[in-house]
Amino acid sequence: MLICDQLTKRYGNQQRNAVDALTLSIEPGQIFGFLGPNGAGKSTTIKMITGLLKPDSGSLSFMGYSLYSDPVSYKRLIGYVPDEPLFYERMSGYEHLSFIADLYGVGREERKQRIEELGERLLLKNALKDEISSYSHGMKQKLSIISALLPSPKLLILDEPMVGLDPKAAFILKTLLVEYAGSGNTVFFSTHVLEVAQQLCSSLGIIKEGTLLYNGTLKDLQLRKQELDATLEALFLELTESGE
Ligand SMILES: Nc1ncnc2c1ncn2[C@@H]1O[C@H](COP(=O)(O)OP(=O)(O)OP(=O)(O)O)[C@@H](O)[C@H]1O
């Protein structure tokens, strides 16, 4: 289980906390959708969960490993697709993936098999021999997704993963995420595409101005608002505009 306890972060030049006492727990097998308006604190939260940004206070653990007392064991279990992936552009896609496999200690045979399987699945296999500098935005996004999945992480975190993907690739990614969670792993992703969140997520977190406004299922949100047929889009707008 992923446990975020009272996570708080304020950037030096800001008047308020970017993330304020955020507490969440996410069970294995869940697809958790993290939603919120621009500037709500989604990327800041994700960067804290991945260990890229240190919270001012609060704690984080995954499968019993604390990010602070056992960071390597914690990070080994996590795959991350950032909102803006960065690569050594002069490497080929295959060289980049081998580099990631080395970092995570994925053996020769397993990496070959995983790279082939994921490359084929995300329709990038033929381009893996090419330099990353020749890739389109969508191809880089696919490479970032393959990199995150390559070590078979128990927790997959994706920041706006649909951006830049064509409809077919977006469909493939959605199918992959459902399969991945179906095998007992945890998926945590942020998105502004509420139809995708409604379709995929077994639980939701809605954040505004650093504060978690809602955490639970769509069904419970519909019940709470007494609007059983309401779309996630309608409920999201109601919740984030009224702020209750
Ligand atoms: N490096 C930074 N320095 C200063 N302030 C920052 C920095 N990064 C984010 N912020 C501020 O923190 C708050 C939360 O930003 P964050 O990027 O986490 O939001 P977000 O929900 O991911 O937004 P979006 O949907 O627009 O990507 C905003 O007020 C933003 O201005």
Image (cartoon, rainbow, N blue to C red):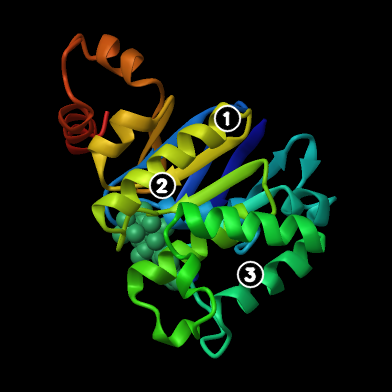
What is the three-letter code of the residue carrying label 1?
Ile
Q: Earlier in the sequence, mark 3 or mark 1?
A: 1
Left/right of residue 35 with respect to residue 112 in the rendered view: left
Relative vertical location of residue 7 with respect to residue 118 in this rendering, above or below: above
Left/right of residue 242 with respect to residue 189 in the rendered view: left
Relative vertical location of residue 203 with respect to residue 110 in this rendering, above or below: above
Q: At 57% across and 46% down in the image, what residue appears?
A: 156
Q: Are marks 2 and 3 in contact (CB under 8 Å)?
A: no
Query: In 3D space, how far apart are the residues under numbered discs 2 and 3 (Cα atoms)?
Result: 18 Å
Task: Please state the quadrant of the image where ligand 1 appears.
Answer: bottom left
Q: Earlier in the sequence, mark 2 or mark 3?
A: 3
Q: Give the percent coordinates (x, y) of residue 68.
A: 78, 52
Q: At 58% across and 53% down in the image, what residue appears?
A: 117
The residue indicated by pointer 3 is 97
Location of the C terminus by quadrant is top left
SS for dot 1: strand
Query: In 3D space, how far apart are the residues under numbered discs 2 and 1 (Cα atoms)?
Result: 21 Å
The residue indicated by pointer 1 is 26
The residue indicated by pointer 2 is 173
Work out whether residue 168 or residue 226 is closer to the camera in this orientation and state it.
168
SS for dot 2: helix
- The answer to which quarter of the image holds residue 58 is top right
Residue 47 visible in the current orientation: no
Relative vertical location of residue 181 with respect to residue 170 in this rendering, above or below: above
Of discs 3 and 1, which sits in the foreground? 3
Q: Give the percent coordinates (x, y) of residue 162.
A: 33, 53
Q: At 50% across and 65% down in the image, what residue appears?
A: 125
Work out whether residue 187 or residue 66 is closer to the camera in this orientation and state it.
187
